[in-house]
Image: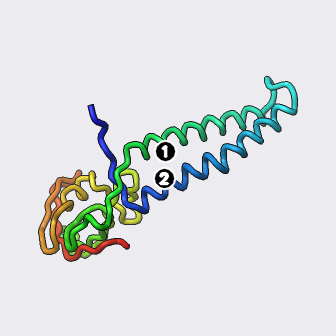
Amino acid sequence: MEKKRTLYTTEGYKTLVDELDYLKNVKMPKVKEDLARARSFGDLSENSEYDEAKDEQGKTVSRIAELEALLENAEVVSEDDLQTGVVNLGCTVKVYDYDMEEEAEYTIVGSNEANAMIGRISDQSPMGAAMMHAHEGDEVTFDSPAGPLKFKILSVTRTK
């Protein structure tokens, strides 16, 4: 069975790569130093510095494994593959919200890059999925916890 690929913008993918690089090349060497220093204090059974360093090592190793798995299943959407005026990953979409009677702007990103507080919505969210592949001028409707919501797509621009 083929694993499902997770879509990323170039920026989102680079963020994961940079974090992995930092953890492997900066953080882990520091954690190893901290462990060695804590061991030098003697009795490990009552050594809080050692316990803290071991906890930090576990968290770091766990995050490295998580990032490696994310990157292994990542698919970067190339700007060259995107059509102008069509909603896709990495696009900024200006919409008119009929319910709120106002305009709003969202950037469509991969699920691991989403942050609704700053207008970055996932392509897999109900709203993002409804907008994917729609064109400027299209109206889209999707189900939300508050009931169906309807938007008109006013403009679609590439983020970069």
Q: Is residue 99 left or right of residue 109?
A: left
Marks 2/1: CA distance?
A: 7 Å
Q: Amino acid at mark 1?
A: Leu
Q: Can see residue 104? A: yes
**Residue at left offset 82%, top offset 38%:** 37
Image x and y of residue 135, in percent? 15, 69
Q: Secondary structure at mark 2?
A: helix
Q: Amino acid at mark 2?
A: Leu
Q: Is residue 97 above or below residue 109?
A: below
Residue 36 in which image quadrant = top right
Residue 60 in which image quadrant = top right
Which residue, given by chain and number where applicable, does mark 1 sit on? 67
Residue 130 — which label? none
Image x and y of residue 23, in percent? 61, 48
Q: Is residue 68 left or right of residue 138?
A: right
Can you name the residue that lies furthest to the front here?
Answer: 80
Nearest the viewer among 76 and 30 is 76
Image x and y of residue 88, in percent? 25, 63
Do the numbered discs 2 and 1 sit on residues whose CB atoms are within 8 Å? yes
Residue 55 in which image quadrant = top right
Nearest the viewer among 125 and 31 is 31
Which residue, given by chain and number where applicable, does mark 2 sit on? 16
Q: Can see residue 96? A: no
Quadrant for the C terminus, please: bottom left
Q: Is residue 72 left or right of residue 32?
A: left
Pointer 2 or 1: first along the chain = 2
Image x and y of residue 92, in percent? 30, 70
Count residues near mark 1 (Cα–Cα under 10 Å), then give few for <14, some for 14-19, many for 20+.
Answer: some
**Residue at left offset 71%, top offset 42%:** 31
- Tally the marks: 2
